[in-house]
Amino acid sequence: MRPIVAALLLFAFAPGLAFADEAISTAPANQSPPPAAAVAPLREVESGDVDGRPRVRLGPCGPEAVAADGKTGTTPHGYVEGGIGTNGYRHIGAGVCKPLANGGAIAVSVSQSQVQDRR
């Protein structure tokens, strides 16, 4: 046991890479700055001319219908989850997101889980 501890201490305090050479740069010497990324604006999907549906725009709560005056709808969107299991898994959940007129949103969600596994 003592030789193992002595060997571990020797390797722990040995100056392994401390005496290595300096870092070598692999980047080219005349490196130009990367091109600026262009920010793509939110895109409106025109679907009224193909299948008669209204235009939609991506809003804070997902796709929103666009009215004729260019304003998006503020109707709430929601979801309901469920779960079941054998030997004790249960899960329920619900949520709603309401877009506001100034571009923001209010979102509320609730969830409940229960696990009673016999293992």
Image: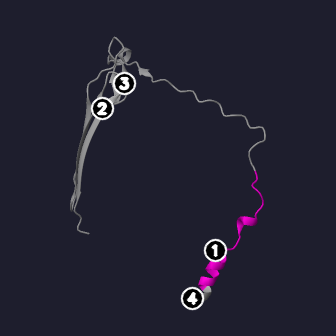
The local secondary structure at tag 4 comes to loop
Q: CA distance from mark 2 to mark 1?
A: 55 Å
Is residue 68 within the magenta segment?
no
The local secondary structure at tag 2 comes to strand
Q: Are marks 2 and 1 in contact (CB under 8 Å)?
A: no
Image quarter for residue 19?
bottom right
The kind of residue on which mark 1 rests is Ala
Q: Are marks 2 and 4 in contact (CB under 8 Å)?
A: no
Of labels 3 and 4, earlier in sequence is 4
Residue closest to the eye, 113 or 55: 113
Counting from the top left corner in percent of width and height, residue 24 is at 76, 53
- For image coordinates 33% across by 24% down, the residue present is 64
101 above or below 107? above
Left or right: where does residue 92 sit relative to residue 4? left
Q: CA distance from mark 4 to mark 1?
A: 17 Å
In the picture of the structure, the residue carrying the numbered disc 2 is: 106
Left or right: where does residue 85 sit relative to residue 69? left
In the picture of the structure, the residue carrying the numbered disc 1 is: 12
Left or right: where does residue 14 sit relative to residue 53? right
Using the image, tell me which numbered label, if any, was put on residue 103: 3
Give the magenta range.
4-24
Quarter of the picture holding the N terminus? bottom right
Counting from the top left corner in percent of width and height, residue 83 is at 23, 50
